[in-house]
Image (cartoon, helix red, strand yellow):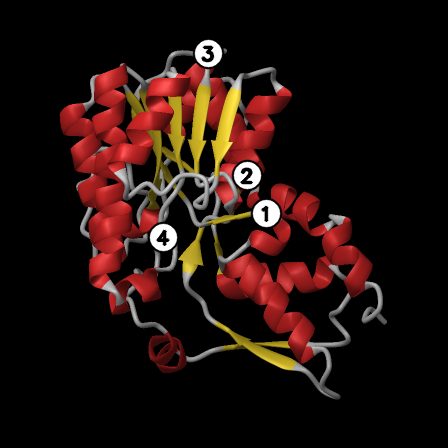
Amino acid sequence: MDRVLITGADGMLGGSLAHRFASNGSDILALNRYSLDVTDYIAINEVFSNYNPRYVLHTAGLVNADHCESNPEFCYKTIYGGTENIVRACEKYNSILFYPQSFLIHESSYCPITEKQLPSPCSHYANMKYKAQILIQDLLPEYLILCLGGFYGGLAKDKNFVGKFYTMLTDALGDSSPSLEIGSRIWQPTFTRDISCIVYDALKSNLRGYYNFAPYNYATFFEVAEFLVKQWGLMDRVSILHASKKFLSDLDTAKRPSSVILDSSHLSSLIKNPFIDWRTSLQRYAADPFFTSRMCDYAV
């Protein structure tokens, strides 16, 4: 494969993409936020001029919706402005762009959402992500955008639900009778390793356009929490309780949909890569020594 530039390469998804493409022999330039500030077009242009990437995997940007809601100008500068700079460089150097989209651009729905359904962002974060998508689709002749279910991965780098739950759990296990309140928001837990495989296969197959990618089934946060506790042998050590909707709304600064279920059948029909049960991937992830080496001290 030709040269591949990865922005945000020290993040959950960027790190996984770097590993996947490097392991397949790609010539990659993986830059973290300290090596490349995507809000600085001069720096971006210099990187493109020197490296001349065929593919650009743009994973740099904020993923904290609550922070974006409290800091809208910074959110705009990083998500939309950073993407605009990358798009300008891709135009200039004829690079093909991969952009990860968030399921949060959609409003709540209990019916599977296809690529034909128009987004309806309900937060500043989601609005900037969608505006960045429109920019890409308007200006670039070749791109791959995947709208993803909520993802996890990166172990200590995981800032999403699985990473947050692990931190909450280890903190709670210090109590004599630990319990955690977990909500019932519906999502499709998606492993970054699976995302990276799909991105690699899609680009290798010259697939272009906008597609959904998530497991074929879904779960609530509560179900995922219970699943992890079982995997780590902690069912007799900690109680997982249902949290009230008011409790959840009090914790969120940014509004979030209560349920988004992405229909990935279109992409599945185009790429020979099985879409697996979320439990299979999460079980593999939970078995990593990063988790088990600590959890075995608490298991009964």
Residue position for label 3? 2
Return the disc, 1 or 3, that comes first in the chain's sequence. Answer: 3
**Percent coordinates x, y for residue 14 in the rendering:** 49, 38
Q: Residue at x 55, y 23 (%)?
A: 21
Instruction: Quarter of the image for the C terminus: give it.
Output: bottom right
Please state which amino acid type lies under the numbered disc 3: Asp
The local secondary structure at tag 4 comes to loop
The local secondary structure at tag 1 comes to loop
Q: Are marks 2 and 1 in contact (CB under 8 Å)?
A: yes
Position of 290 relative to 135 (above/below) = below
Q: Residue at x 52, y 46 (%)?
A: 12
Please state which amino acid type lies under the numbered disc 4: Leu
Residue position for label 2? 15
Position of 30 relative to 165 (above/below) = above
Return the disc, 4 or 1, that comes first in the chain's sequence. Answer: 4
Q: Are marks 4 and 1 in contact (CB under 8 Å)?
A: no
> Does residue 43 show up?
yes
Q: Quadrant of residue 158?
A: bottom right
Q: Are marks 2 and 4 in contact (CB under 8 Å)?
A: no
State the separation of the CA atoms marked 2 and 3.
19 Å
Residue position for label 4? 62
Position of 137 relative to 177 (above/below) = above
Position of 269 relative to 185 (above/below) = above
Report crowding for label 2: few under 14, some 14 to 19, many 20 or more residues within 10 A (C-alpha): many
Can you tell which mark lies on residue 154? 1
Q: Residue furthest bottom?
A: 176
Q: Residue at x 78, y 56 (%)?
A: 292
**Percent coordinates x, y for residue 107 in the rendering:** 24, 54
Q: Residue at x 66, y 79 (%)?
A: 172
**Percent coordinates x, y for residue 222 in the rendering:** 53, 66
Return the disc, 2 or 4, that comes first in the chain's sequence. Answer: 2
